[in-house]
Structures are given as C-alpha cells and as structure tokens.
Image (spheres, grey):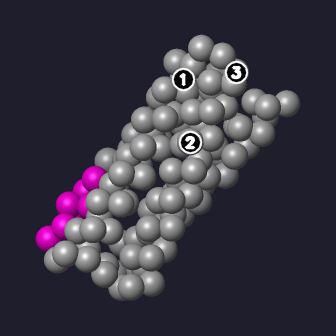
C-alpha cells in the first residue's frame, strides 16, 4: 500500500506558503516569523520526499527524523503566532493540528523503521 504522506506533506507546505505570504504583509516581526515558518514548514515534505528515495534503512530513518524535527519546529512557530495574536487563532488552529498529526505519523514511522 502506497503511503499518502508525501502528498499530505506537500499540501501542508502549500498552506504554509500561503500563510507566510499573508504574514509578510503584516510588518517586520510578522515577516521574520513568516520566514522561520516557511523554512521549517516546507522542509518537512522535502525530507519526506528524500526519504522515499533513500538508499538504506539508516538513510530513510535519518531523512524522516529530520522531517519530524522540522514538523516540531513548525508547530512551535504556529503556537507562537497563535500566542502573539498576529493572526486569528481559527486561521492557525487547523495547521497547528496538522503539524501535530504529522509529528505523530513521522514518530511512528521512525520507531517502526528502527525495529
């Protein structure tokens, strides 16, 4: 069975790009946070894609571990944006939830791949 994780992380990255564009127009602080969010939020899918073409189990685990770290960082930036009220919480909540889900999925894949 083919995993839908690459498609899911790509769709998540698309939403992060759109959110970052909206943040950039809010001023310097928002633009700085948007850049951090953009880097981590789009890196998740890039590392999953690299992991799909890994040359070994260790390489696969390494790429997925990086993707998981990036998902955690993305979750952090989304929480910070929510706490600082730079955007309405209802705009950020679905992405925050998706980041949580990606962390859980990636963690499970990593643990299963190590055993």
- Residue at left offset 63%, top offset 26%: 60
Would residue 109 be found to the left or right of residue 71 on screen? right
- Residue at left offset 57%, top offset 19%: 54
Residue at the extreme right of the image, as rendered: 115
Q: Is residue 100 visible?
A: yes
Real-space CA distance between mark 1 and mark 3, rounded to the nearest whole angstrom: 11 Å
Is 71 rendered above or below residue 24? above
Residue 65, percent from left and from top: 62, 41
The mark that comes first in sequence, 1 or 3, is 1
Residue 53, percent from left and from top: 52, 18
Quadrant (top left, top right, bottom left, bottom right) of the C terminus: top right
The mark that comes first in sequence, 1 or 2, is 1
Which segment is the magenta one?
17-26
For residue 66, which numbered disc appears in the image?
2
For residue 39, which numbered disc appears in the image?
none
Label 3 belongs to which residue?
57
> Considering depth in this image, is 38 or 5 the residue closer to the camera?
38
Label 1 belongs to which residue?
52
């Amino acid at each position: 069975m083919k995993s839908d994780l690459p498609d899911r992380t790509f769709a998540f990255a698309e939403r992060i790009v759109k959110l970052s564009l909206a943040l950039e127009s809010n001023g310097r602080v928002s633009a700085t946070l948007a850049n951090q969010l953009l880097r981590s939020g789009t890196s998740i899918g890039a590392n999953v894609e690299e992991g799909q073409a890994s040359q070994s189990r260790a390489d696969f685990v390494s790429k997925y571990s990086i993707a998981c770290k990036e998902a955690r960082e993305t979750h952090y930036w989304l929480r910070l944006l929510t706490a600082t009220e730079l955007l309405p919480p209802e705009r950020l909540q679905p992405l925050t939830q998706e980041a949580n889900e990606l962390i859980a999925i990636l963690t499970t894949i990593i643990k299963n791949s190590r055993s």
